Image (spheres, rainbow, N blue to C red):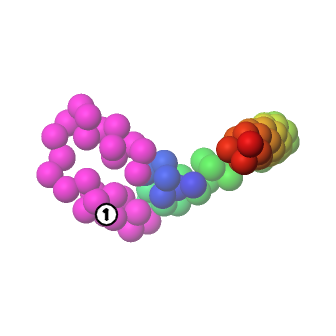
Amino acid sequence: MIKSFLSFTTKALSLVVKIKDINALQNELKNDYIITKEMSALSGGLALRCGRLLAVALMKIILLVIKMGIRLLGLMKYQMLSNLQ
């Protein structure tokens, strides 16, 4: 989660400020003890406060993806049957 957030923020920052090497900046921030420690505390606190809400939202997203997959399989099956005729 920390790596994803740092990646997102450095890419967003590069849209505003010209950065020579985004990957080098990301690696430097990932290796910074203070930033990593603070991000861990922040994400842990967020997970404690919103853990149940995040779990429900994630479950709904998973069910939606499964439902879309089932519909896609149905469409593929229909196309295969129509190609046979």
Relative placement, left or right, of 4 versus 68 is left
Q: Position of residue 6 (x, y in %)?
A: 43, 51
What residue sits 14% from the left and 51% below the top? 20
> Which of the 4 quarters of the picture holds residue 83?
top right
Q: Residue furthest front?
A: 85
Relative placement, left or right, of 20 versus 59 is left
Using the image as rendered, state which of residue 15 and residue 39 is in the foreground.
15
Q: Position of residue 27 (x, y in %)?
A: 33, 64
Q: Is residue 49 visible?
A: no
Instruction: Specify the segment rendered in magenta.
Output: 7-33
> Which of the 4 quarters of the picture holds residue 9?
top left
Indicate the quadrant containing the C terminus: top left, top right, bottom left or bottom right.
top right
What residue sits 24% from the left and 31% below the top? 16
Mark 1 sits on what residue? 28
What residue sits 25% from the left and 40% below the top? 14
Q: Is residue 19 magenta?
A: yes
> Which of the 4 quarters of the picture holds residue 40?
bottom right
Indicate the quadrant containing the N terminus: top left, top right, bottom left or bottom right.
bottom right
Q: Is residue 24 visible?
A: yes
Using the image as rendered, state which of residue 58 and residue 67 is in the foreground.
67
